């Protein structure tokens, strides 16, 4: 597994924390040598220890999502360029990041009522502790939409925590890199988003 051992985390609770904090994930699968990637919210179910999601039935990737199919899910946390200027020692430029790769097998959820339960569960998680919206099982729009999604869960077979956080540097340089990652997580986002939305 790459990156090197000092950039790997085997702490499952930390990886679950990344999944919960950054649930918008990349679902990766393949068939006949052709890879498919879809970006969707994927939720960790504390009770089952599985990942839960749904995908548009018209997405070509659905053809790869058969029972028992192997997939990879990538959860991307914060990342940033690290300038040598922040270190107390002489270093080269680098990039720090927090990423979790999950490998697992697909189980399709075909019963409409069970699929609605996954939609409700995902919505409840994403709304958080003080929900502004509660998705009710009798919601008529969901009733119409459920026929156009493929719900599924993923039984996790492998966890990979890729936490590149300047662990090979001295304590002060690690702290400086941590602050750089914290600061970059919020800086410049508003201007960037406004620029993207411009006609």
Image (spheres, helix red, strand yellow):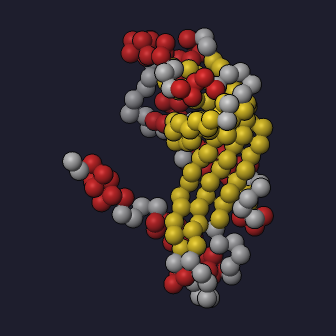
In-image side of 110 versus 149 (left or right): right
Q: Is residue 14 left or right of residue 125?
A: right
**Residue 153 seen in this snapshot:** no
Q: Residue at x 49, y 12 (%)?
A: 147
Q: Give coordinates of residue 177: x percent, y percent.
A: 57, 74
Which of the pair 183/64 is nearer the observer?
A: 64
Q: Nearer the viewer, residue 152 or 183?
A: 152
- Up the image or down, 52 lies above or below 6; here it is above
> Residue, x 56% and y 20% (percent of image)?
150
Residue 55 in picture, x, y percent from top left: 53, 26
Quarter holding the N terminus is: bottom right
19 left or right, relative to 5: left
Which of the 4 quarters of the picture holds residue 35? Answer: top right
Count of labels in the image: 0
**Image quadrant assignment for residue 25:** top right
> Does residue 2 appear in this view?
yes
Q: Residue drawn at (73%, 59%), measured in percent from left and top?
A: 2
Query: Which corner quadrant of the image does residue 67 belong to?
Result: top right
> Where's residue 146, x and y in %?
48, 15
Q: In front: 17, or 129?
A: 17
Given residues 168 and 199, the one toward you in this image is 199
Residue, x 78% and y 64% (percent of image)?
A: 5
Question: Is residue 180 positioned above or below 151 on the image?
Answer: below
Residue 47: x percent and y percent? 70, 30
Is 18 rendered above or below residue 85? above
């Amino acid at each position: 597994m790459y990156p090197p051992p000092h950039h790997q985390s085997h702490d499952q609770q930390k990886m679950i924390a990344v999944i919960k904090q950054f649930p918008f994930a990349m679902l990766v699968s393949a068939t006949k040598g052709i890879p498919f990637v879809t970006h969707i919210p994927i939720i960790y179910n504390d009770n089952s220890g599985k990942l839960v999601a749904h995908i548009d039935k018209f997405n070509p990737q659905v053809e790869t999502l058969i029972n028992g199919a192997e997939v990879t899910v990538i959860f991307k946390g914060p990342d940033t360029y690290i300038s040598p200027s922040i270190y107390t020692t002489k270093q080269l430029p680098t990039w720090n990041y927090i990423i979790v790769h999950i490998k697992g097998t697909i189980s399709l959820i075909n019963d409409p009522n069970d699929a609605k339960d996954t939609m409700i569960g995902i919505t409840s998680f994403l709304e958080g502790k003080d929900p502004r919206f509660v998705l009710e099982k009798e919601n008529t729009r969901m009733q119409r939409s459920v026929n156009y999604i493929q719900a599924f869960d993923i039984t996790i077979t492998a966890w990979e925590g890729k936490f590149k956080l300047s662990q090979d540097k001295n304590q002060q340089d690690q702290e400086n890199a941590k602050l750089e990652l914290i600061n970059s997580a919020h800086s410049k986002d508003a201007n960037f988003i406004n620029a993207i939305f411009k006609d």
